[in-house]
Image: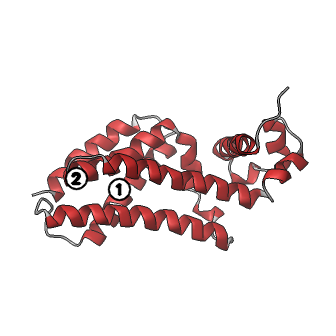
Amino acid sequence: MARIHTEERQVQIIDEAIRIIHESGYGALGIRRLAQRVGITEPAIYRHFSGKDEIIVGILDRVLKMGDMMLSRVSRSPDSRTKIKNFVLFHFEFLQKKPELTSIVFSENLFHNNPVLKVKLKTIIYSRHQLLKGLLDAAQKQNVLADVDTDALAVLIIGNIRLIVLEWRLSDFEFDLLERGQRAWVTLEKLIFV
């Protein structure tokens, strides 16, 4: 059997770690269990990651890359309204395809006791907030957005996204997340645009 390249193996390990956390919670993520699920030895895991925290950093790096995908999509949008809409709906589309990531994004308790993980999570939150605020500022300069505090509006929009995703997660993914997000967008659009 051909040997798997380091990058591919790291992706495998991170994918399986996400599945374990999604199925059983962070406490169930042990190196032995992870190695068994990936089909390698425990020392092989340690050749790629120093431990659980570094694996979580890898997962958060993947979430940060999601931001790059979102930025690419938003950048291709023709106008401010569409850019903001694409920002909002991207979250619902992406997470509907990858519901297991909600187990990471909504596990803030993972990050409290680890300064590295906490900084990584804050970076993700800050980058999303700044991107949305920039989109809102641009819309306001074009006189298509209501005269409101764009920083506060960004918090409200991101909070709305998080609440809808959390309800979806707590319902065991019972409803169509994208459809619910689109409904929320229709209301939001009526409220914020002039």
- Mark 1 or mark 2, earlier in chain: 1
Mark 2, Cα crowd under 10 Å, few <14 / some 14-19 / many 20+, is some
Say whether marks 1 and 2 touch (CB < 8 Å).
yes
Which residue corresponds to the image point at 33% horizontal and 36% vertical from the top-left?
Answer: 179
Up the image or down, 8 lies above or below 31; here it is above
Which residue corresponds to the image point at 33% horizontal and 61% vertical from the top-left?
Answer: 132
Q: Splitting the image into 4 quarters, where does residue 113 fall?
A: bottom right
x, y percent for residue 166:
46, 50
User: Could you tell me if residue 18 is visible in this image?
Assistant: yes
Give the residue number, with chain letter if any, for mark 2: 188
Q: How is the image coloured?
A: secondary structure
Up the image or down, 26 lies above or below 127; here it is above
Residue type (three-letter) at the residue carrying disc 1: Asn
Which residue corresponds to the image point at 75% horizontal and 49% vertical from the top-left?
Answer: 28
x, y percent for residue 170:
50, 45
Q: Nearer the viewer, residue 175 or 74?
A: 74
The kind of secondary structure element at disc 1 is helix
Give the residue number, with chain letter if any, for mark 1: 160
On screen, residue 72 versus residue 11, left or right, reads left
Q: Residue furthest top?
A: 1
